[in-house]
Image (tube, rainbow, N blue to C red):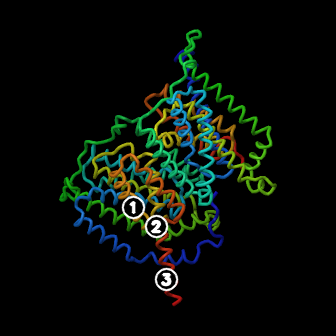
């Protein structure tokens, strides 16, 4: 029941932004500097920073599906969980090498994206939301009942992960885990950028704005959406796999509704449809929930809940949206003067 | 093959479970039908009702006296929220609505956690309803029968209101076509406020009566949300009849599924819902 946002199709600023995003901006540089600085300045917070990196990957994957393709999902955790379990089982039974583990997870989650996408993405609006939710809950219950394979409630654990490239052992302080995660994050970010700015990505945006019109223009809408969903799923699978490799544990919570909700919150905090919104949102979300939980483990949901309500209310485009509105204002002012 | 009496008692369990789901879902389907708002907080109102009754009962009130007070209290809370926060929710885009109501649910969970602690709690069943009836090798819990009777009564009452009163006619009009209803002079906004509060009351009723099956805990609002949403979607938005059928079907399928294929536990119901929504994405009874 989504109304076409704009009858002409893509608006001029949107086109301009689509062209501009091909270039690397200051944001990527600042991000890299921050990640390097964290390593040297806050060694005690590396595990937390690793969580941030993983959450960023997860949120980026959702942004591709939701922000670019307009696929409204309440069950994105399904890919995260499948990736996690795939990586865990792979390490437990096949090979402990981490990078091939990530690939296996990405393929598993990607295939699930194609299979579920073909059936789910025919629906729109509320039915789509409900189907994604039902799909995720189904897999969650399935993992719960396959106790022999997944460990059920206790989670999957007891596997080792080999050193990265056979050289860098995962240490107690999480240094390797951090660098490894950040490197994967950079790769994922680049992939997502390429996808988002490709013709394919622009088609996806077109579908989000007006699916019917794109269909009339001869775009195979369902195919495109399924492909986007699968790519998004594969990236989310990588996030889940990273978490599985770094923490050496995959729990049922990786498939849970709460995680699907949390990643949405991350994206709405940061801003949908602009990739770096996922970065800002993840940092704010993970750090805030960690701090709030440390200060008051029982009542931090107050902060989280209040934050969501206030964000949607006051800054529906997220922090990044506020920010770009601000810079656009400034630019406009410069032009006038 | 299990005996007939086992089947019958499974049936009663499933039906009473389904009726509780229906009570909670009925308010949601009406508000969803009118406003197309996915109100993820709806289960929170059932929780608020349950905890209000719990507080009253632990102060010494009998359950049947606490029940109406808890329902009225929840209606008041729902009305207040509808007049304030939901005004903002209505204005945002579809996905913002989902997120905002999710945020609101978190706030409810946190509030309940603060007030009542995180333990699972049961509302004690009154003496008169405790125990079982024995009839020809059949054991039937009195409370379950009471549940089915009460919720069937409420369902009939709802149906009568919908079919035979002016208010019901207006509601049906608003669900069919909100704009047209507005154009013909129906105050849809006010109608929605009333329906919203009534829906919260029904949810509270379900929360209190169903506390035996769906025990109270702060995460109640999230835990049973998926089930309730499924009832609404399977039934078709805005269709009370659909919700009733869907709730009963889900309750029965879940109960029988857990009994006959215990190794798959809760899995059966989600597969069923998923398959069903693929075949009929608009649910059982919806032609809009």
Question: Residue at left 59%, top 50%?
Answer: B81
Quote the CA–CA distance across marks 2 and 1: 10 Å
Q: Secondary structure at mark 3?
A: helix
Question: Vertical placement of B264 versus A64: above or below?
Answer: above
Label 2 marks a residue whose chain is A
| Marker disc for residue A284 | 1
- The residue indicated by pointer 3 is A331
Task: Say which quarter of the image contains residue A9.
Answer: bottom right
Residue A231 lies in what quarter of the image? bottom left
Residues marked 2 and 1, same chain: yes
Q: Nearer the viewer, residue B255 or B225?
A: B225
Q: Residue A245's mark?
A: none
**First reached walking from the N terminus: tag 1 or tag 3:** 1
Spatial distance from mark 3 to mark 2, Cα to Cα? 18 Å
x, y (%) of residue A46?
26, 59
Q: Chain of mark 3?
A: A
Q: What is the chain identity of the residue bearing mark 1?
A: A
Whichever of labels 3 and 2 marks the residue nearer the N terminus, that label is 2
């Amino acid at each position: 029941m989504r109304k076409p946002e704009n009858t002409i199709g893509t608006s001029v600023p949107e086109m301009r932004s689509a062209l501009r995003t091909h270039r690397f901006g200051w944001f990527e540089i600042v991000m890299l500097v921050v990640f390097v600085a964290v390593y040297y300045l806050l060694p005690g917070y590396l595990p937390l920073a690793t969580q941030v990196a993983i959450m960023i990957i997860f949120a980026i994957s959702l942004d591709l599906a939701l922000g670019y393709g307009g696929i409204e999902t309440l069950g994105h955790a399904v890919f995260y969980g499948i990736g996690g379990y795939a990586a865990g089982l792979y390490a437990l039974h096949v090979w402990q090498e981490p990078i091939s583990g990530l690939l296996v997870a990405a393929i598993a989650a990607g295939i699930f994206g194609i299979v579920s996408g073909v059936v789910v993405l025919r629906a729109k609006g509320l039915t789509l939301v409900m189907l994604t939710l039902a799909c995720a809950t189904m897999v969650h219950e399935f993992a719960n009942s396959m106790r022999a394979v997944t460990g059920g409630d206790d989670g999957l654990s007891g596997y080792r992960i080999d050193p990265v490239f056979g050289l860098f052992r995962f240490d107690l302080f999480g240094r390797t885990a951090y660098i490894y995660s950040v490197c994967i994050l950079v790769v994922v970010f680049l992939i997502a950028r390429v996808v988002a700015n490709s013709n394919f990505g622009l088609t996806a945006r077109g579908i989000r704005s007006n699916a019917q019109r794109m269909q009339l223009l001869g775009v195979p809408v369902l195919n495109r959406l399924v492909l986007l969903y699968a790519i998004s799923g594969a990236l989310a699978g990588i996030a889940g796999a990273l978490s599985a490799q770094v923490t050496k544990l995959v729990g049922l919570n990786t498939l849970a509704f709460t995680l699907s909700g949390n990643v949405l919150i991350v994206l709405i905090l940061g801003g949908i449809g602009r990739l770096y919104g996922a970065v800002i949102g993840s940092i704010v979300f993970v750090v805030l929930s960690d701090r709030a939980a440390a200060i008051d483990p029982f009542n931090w949901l107050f902060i989280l809940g209040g934050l969501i309500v206030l964000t949607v209310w006051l800054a529906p485009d997220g922090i990044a949206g506020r920010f770009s509105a601000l810079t656009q204002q400034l630019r406009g002012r410069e032009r006038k003067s | 093959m299990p005996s007939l009496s086992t089947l019958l008692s499974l049936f009663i369990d499933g039906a009473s479970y389904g009726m509780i789901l229906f009570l909670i879902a009925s308010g949601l389907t009406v508000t969803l039908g009118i406003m197309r708002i996915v109100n993820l907080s709806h289960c929170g109102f059932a929780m608020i009702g349950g905890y209000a009754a719990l507080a009253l009962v632990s102060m010494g009130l009998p359950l049947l006296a606490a029940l109406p007070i808890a329902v009225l209290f929840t209606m008041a809370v729902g009305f207040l929220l509808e007049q304030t926060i939901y005004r903002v929710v209505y204005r945002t885009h579809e996905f913002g609505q989902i997120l905002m109501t999710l945020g609101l649910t978190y706030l409810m969970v946190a509030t309940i956690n603060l007030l009542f602690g995180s333990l699972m709690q049961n509302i004690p069943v009154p003496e008169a309803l405790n125990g079982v009836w024995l009839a020809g090798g059949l054991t039937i819990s009195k409370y379950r029968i009471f549940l089915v009777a009460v919720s069937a009564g409420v369902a009939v009452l709802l149906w009568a209101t919908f079919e035979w009163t002016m208010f019901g006619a207006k509601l049906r009009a608003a669900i069919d076509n909100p704009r047209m209803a507005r154009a013909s002079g129906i105050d849809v906004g006010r109608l929605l406020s009333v329906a919203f509060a009534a829906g919260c009351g029904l949810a509270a009723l379900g929360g209190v009566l169903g506390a035996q099956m769906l025990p109270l805990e702060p995460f109640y609002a999230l835990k049973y949300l998926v089930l309730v949403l499924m009832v609404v979607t399977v039934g078709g938005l805005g269709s009370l009849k659909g919700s009733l059928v869907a709730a009963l079907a889900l309750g029965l399928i879940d109960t029988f599924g857990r009994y006959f294929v215990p190794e798959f536990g809760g899995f059966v119901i989600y597969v069923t819902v998923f398959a069903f929504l693929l075949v009929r994405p608009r649910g059982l009874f919806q032609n809009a």
